[in-house]
Image (cartoon, grey):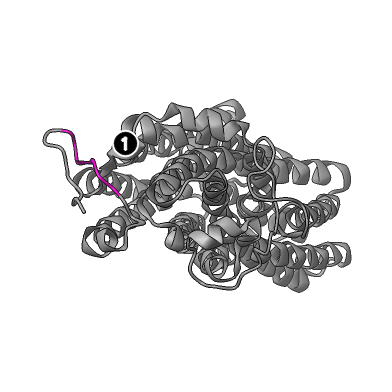
Amino acid sequence: MTAPTTAPGRGRWIEHWDPEDEGFWERKGRRIARRNLALSVVSEHIGFSVWSMFSVLALFMGPEYGIDPAGKFFLVAVASLVGAALRVPYGFAVARFGGRNWTVISAAMLLAPTTALLVVMEPGTSYTTFMLVAVLTGVGGANFASSMTNINSFYPLRLKGWALGVNAGGGNIGVAVVQLAGLLTIAVAGAAQPRLLLAAYLPLIVAATVLSARHMDNLGPVRNDTGAAREAARDRHTWIMSFLYIGTFGSFIGYSFAFGLVLQNQFGRTPLQAASLTFIGPLLGSLIRPVGGRLADRLGGARVTLWNFGAMTGAVGIVVAASVRESLALFIAGFIVLFVLTGLGNGSTFKMIPGIFQAKAHAMGLTGEAAAVRARRLSGASMALIGAVGGFGGVGINMALRQSFLTSGTGTGAFAVFLGYYVVCAAVTWAVYLRRGVGRAGGGGAGGVGDGGGRVRAAAAGEEEARAAYARV
């Protein structure tokens, strides 16, 4: 088997890549993939921190800033909206520019919002100015799409759940880290010193950019594949998985942005009190995401996703009860459980994506490397779209909470809506990916769905499992 080669003068382009070949993987692939995964996590981590910066800075915005709770919710919603929308071009940029090249560009772009915030973060700045800077912070959220698309191409199907979970979890934890950094800043310097937090991130962004440029690689086989984007957009499973990902990642990022504001405005916590609690949920949700991917590798992504949505329904029921009773302790406990479940669900849903396209490739009669190549190109393109739509869930959560606070002064109404959404997600997961007797994989148009005896329990994701159908995706 040909070793991975780097074309001279092409900026670390690897022209041959076959991770499904175990000999290739053990000789060369594993080491290269892990190096790129580690550096991808670093850049994505900082991107998430920048994207969620307004959720932390809102705690620094006292009465002297002249922004009410609804206005703060709207600022974080704008950051969510832009980050979600930019995920589409970011995800497709990997095929156009190369994973390493785009990681360098996207990491360097984080300097723009961070520097802008460093300049404007003071009382007297207009709300319009804050809104424009919130738009800039969206580039941090877009990093996720390109990072996941890139790492998906490096790993074999049997390890994608773990690899994508580590990549996304390491990025997601940037939310908790910036919230912890905000807590440290408030505790040490006071709520009047937000610029200290921002200044700390500038050298980190520069370091991530330089490390990516020096040590990451581009994969030639995924270059300039614009047809994959069109094909993925036509596949109904891209949009079904987008709907489910709203329930998992949309919940994670939406709650991460909103939790501190809810604690301040519904339960009367001070900035320091709120900051001392807000990081716990995002931290646990991020750390558990690789576990969700690993469980999906072993038990099947659809199964884990179904169980998870059932548990999320129960957790948000606790949050609703706590909100009605105004019980802070019960509210925090329910919310932390909910955060953990969003992390598990993030891992299991993203594991489903490459499995779906692997099963569809086999249903078309493809085998071996031909099936793997088709699955990689379509799952990578699909991830860009799914990640974008999932990010819009964070917008919906913050807008729903904004409206709920405007209407009733609490978030109870919004939480009740979220509960209903999780029930629908559980029903869709069961009906499309687990219900028996709904047809064979790949049947009909964009691809039918079926069990076809696919409820297997083997840990490995080999060709026979891929043929079995989507219950194992």
Query: Quarter of the image containing the N terminus?
Result: bottom left
- The residue lying toward the viewer, choosing from 65 and 175, is 175
Q: Is residue 146 above or below residue 314?
A: above
The extreme front residue here reads 365
Nearer-the-camera pick, 318 or 274: 318
Relative image position of residue 20 (x, y in whole percent): 36, 56
31 w.r.t. 449: above or below: below
Estimate the x, y position of residue 16 in percent, counting from the top left: 25, 44
Badge 1 amino acid: Gly
Residue 15 colored in magenta in the image: yes
Is residue 157 part of the magenta span, yes or no?
A: no
Q: Residues within 10 Å of mark 1 (few under 14, many from 20)?
A: many
Name the foreground residue: 431 vs 115.
431
At x 49%, y 56%, the residue is 182
Span highlighted in magenta in the image: 10-17
Q: Quadrant of residue 101?
A: top left
> Magenta region, mostly helix, strand or loop?
loop
Horizontal and vertical percent position of residue 96: 36, 29
Query: What is the x, y in percent for residue 232?
Result: 56, 35
